[in-house]
Amino acid sequence: MKMGDGVEQAIHSVAMLSGLSEGGVLSAAALAEFHGVSTSYLLKHLQALSGAGILDTVPGPKGGYRLAKAPKEISLLDIVLAVEGSQPAFRCAEIRQRGPNPVSDRLFAQPCTINAAMLKAERIYRAELAKTSLADIGIELASVDDGSIAARGCAFLEIHERKTAR
């Protein structure tokens, strides 16, 4: 299964926003700059995250984005579904019923076994993403960071974070 680039950008952006101080926001342009991605492409995903209730949007020239929930309340699945949508990755088109030499319809009374296997795998991967929160990702990162990653993020936030009322 392949997810779009927007999923990676969204997860990293939400992680970056988790480092904001109380009342702080970051612009889409700042998030795009930090990650070296297109602002317009990232903006589409930030809007989807806002629509899903993961991010708050603060309008105006000093506005930007911030988390709408605590990091422990945001799962990786929440982010993936906001960006990719809730449709299953595998969609059975019942091609088993096409082609030459058709067989009796009664042989197709049961659900497609390939579809069933694919949906089972998707349920497992979604369950794993659902139990992994943004806070969990932060804890894992902190356990392997020698301080360089945190320092890079803090230095960027020091320059680009905008202060607003909450």
Image: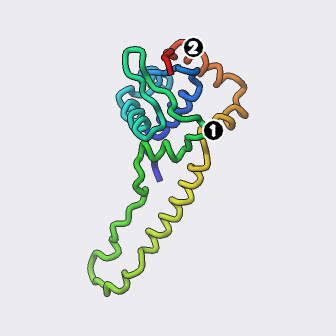
User: In terms of sequence position, does the residue under pointer 2 or pointer 1 come before the other?
Assistant: 1
Q: Is residue 54 left or right of residue 18?
A: left
Q: Is residue 83 left or right of residue 102?
A: right
Q: Is residue 62 left or right of residue 73?
A: left
What is the secondary structure assignment of the residue under circle 1?
helix
Q: Position of residue 23 (x, y in %)?
A: 53, 20
**Separation of marks 2 and 1 at Cα, in angstroms:** 22 Å
- From the image, tell me which residue sits under label 1: 137
- From the image, tell me which residue sits under label 2: 158
Q: Which residue corresponds to the image point at 38% horizontal and 26% vertical from the top-left?
A: 39
Q: Which residue corresponds to the image point at 61% horizontal and 46% vertical from the top-left?
A: 132
What is the secondary structure assignment of the residue under circle 2?
helix
**In the displayed structure, would residue 98 be above or below residue 81?**
below
Amino acid type, mark 1? Ile
Q: Position of residue 108 (x, y in %)?
A: 37, 81
Q: Classify mark 2: residues with Cα within 10 Å, few (<14), some (14-19) or many (20+).
A: few
* Viewer-nearest residue: 65 or 101: 65
Q: Is residue 136 left or right of residue 160?
A: right
Amino acid type, mark 2? Glu
Q: Residue furthest top?
A: 159
Q: How is the image coloured?
A: rainbow
Q: Position of residue 136 (x, y in %)?
A: 65, 40
